[in-house]
Amino acid sequence: MARSISKGPFCSPSLLNRVSRVLKLSLKERIKTWSRQSVVIPDLVGLTVLVHNGKLHMPIHILEEMVGHKLGEFAPTRVFHGHSKEKQPRTKERHDRLKK
């Protein structure tokens, strides 16, 4: 179920405080957050946010196209190592060993 439009997008209050401080002082520092559920707001465009993925903080440079999405979408929590190779039938291996 989607969030009510009258409520507006959710953004963590602590994240908003840090963003306003960085913008007010025009600092070039990264903003570290654990709030993956916060929505990317237009104030974040151009900043680098370190989003926690459960193990470490991943740097994410916020672009215009990311507005409206959640921060957690850009920091994957799982690592895909690929599918395993297809195993050869054992009979062929035995045949080759006996041949030598």
Image (cartoon, rainbow, N blue to C red):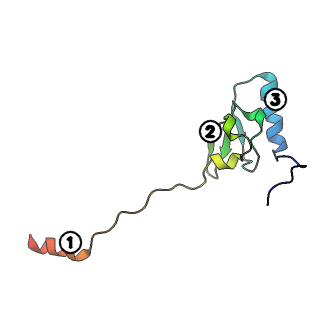
Q: Quadrant of residue 41?
A: top right
Measured Cα–Cα span from mark 3 to mark 2: 19 Å
Compare residues 35 and 44 and report the one nearer the observer: 44
The residue beneath circle 3 is 21
Q: Earlier in the sequence, mark 3 or mark 1?
A: 3
Q: Find residue 59 and report its image quarter.
A: top right
Q: Is residue 19 visible?
A: yes
Residue 87 in the figure: left or right of residue 12: left
Callout 2: few (<14), some (14-19), or many (20+) C-alpha neighbours within 10 Å?
some
Side of 14 where 66 appears, left or right: left
Work out whether mark 3 precedes mark 2 in sequence or the reverse, and give the earlier one: 3
Nearer the N terminus, badge 1 or badge 2?
2
Q: Are marks 1 and 2 in contact (CB under 8 Å)?
A: no
Tag 1: Cα neighbours inside 10 Å, few (<14), some, or many (≥20)? few
Q: Which picture quadrant has residue 100?
A: bottom left
Q: Position of residue 8 (x, y in %)?
A: 86, 46
Q: Residue furthest right?
A: 6
Image marks 3 and 2: residues in contact by CB distance under 8 Å: no
Task: Say what amino acid the circle numbered 1 marks.
Answer: Glu
Q: CA distance from mark 1 to mark 2?
A: 47 Å
Picture coordinates of residue 25, whole percent (x, y)? 79, 22
SS label for mark 2: strand
Which residue has dot 1 on it? 93
Quarter occupied by the N terminus = bottom right
Left or right placement of residue 16 versus residue 70 in this view: right
Q: Residue 33 appears at what percent x and percent y?
A: 72, 43
Q: Secondary structure at mark 1?
A: helix
Q: Amino acid at mark 2?
A: Pro
Report the residue at 74% width, 34% height from top.
Answer: 44
Instruction: Report which residue position mark 2 lands on.
Output: 59
In the displayed structure, would residue 92 be above or below residue 6?
below
**Residue 20 higher or lower than 66, as above or below:** above
